[in-house]
Amino acid sequence: MDRYNNRFLEPERGTGMIGWAVKQLVIWLVGGLVVYGFVNQQQFTAGSAPATAPGSAAVHASGPLAANTSSAEQLRPLGQPMAQVTNSLTLRARADGHVFLDATVNGAPIPFIIDTGATMVALTHADALKAGVAGNLNYTISLNIANGVAKAAPVMIRQIRIGALEVDNVEGMVVQGDAGISLLGQSFLKRLQGYEMHGDVLTLSWQ
């Protein structure tokens, strides 16, 4: 190579070896800083690109989820159950075919026989006294019974409870005299979701 073309690498005349060395050092430092800055810029650009992708994916992933939640709220008002739960009580008939049970009427324990053919709940006078509904009775109802005709007075029973089953404000009547047992009739049964008799098993169901 021509010596004239290599003058850049040679010390300038009159400056000496030290001046030439300082000049070369400055040139290499500046060049190194330029290269370092370029490399860092490339790494920053490459490293920041993946951060954008997950963010974008999260936005797209949350879109359908938000739409599904909105649809669920439109189908079912907030705070309401998805489906109503049905409760049931199973009772077995005795050998004579009658179904007996113990209930509480206005908090008083009273034995009943379930009579699906009876129009209303019928209390004996003694049971009406225990339930607190025997006052100021007006016997205006005539009943045909096995022994003839009986008189009964209409009453409103505040509450009848059988285990977890509770029915309020049930129409009933108080039968004159203390013979027999109180009957659980249709004025109570029709307030349930339903009842079924299969063989000797009676099932009461309610919501």
Image (spheres, rainbow, N blue to C red):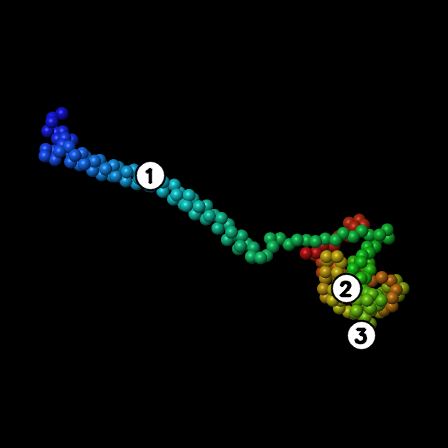
Q: Any mark on residue 136, and which? A: 3
**Residues at circles 1 and 2 in contact by the CB criterion of under 8 Å:** no
Q: CA distance from mark 3 to mark 1?
A: 97 Å
Q: In this orientation, which residue lies closer to the viewer: 27 or 170?
A: 27
Per the image, the residue denoted by label 1 is 43
Say which of 169 and 26 sits in front: 26
The residue that label 2 is drawn on is 107
Please tell me which of labels 1 and 2 falls first in the chain. 1
Tell me residue 202's x, y (percent): 77, 52
Q: Say which label, 3 or 2, has the lower sequence index.
A: 2
**Residue 121 at x, y percent in the picture:** 78, 63
The structure residue drawn at horizontal position 17% and vertical position 36%, both measured from the top left corner, is 23
- Where is the C terminus found, in terms of image quarters? bottom right
Visible residue check, residue 120: no
Residue type of the residue flagged with mark 1: Gln
* Callout 1 crowding tier (Cα within 10 Å): few <14, some 14–19, many ≥20: few
The answer to whether 42 appears left or right of 184 in the picture is left
Q: Which amino acid is tagged 3? A: Asn
Q: Position of residue 20 (x, y in %)?
A: 16, 34
Q: Amino acid at mark 2?
A: Gly
Quarter of image, res 111:
bottom right
Q: Closer to us: mark 3 or mark 2?
A: 2
Side (left or right) of 191 relative to 59: right
Mark 2 surroundings within 10 Å by alpha-carbon count, few (fewer than 14), some (14 through 19), many (20 or more)? some
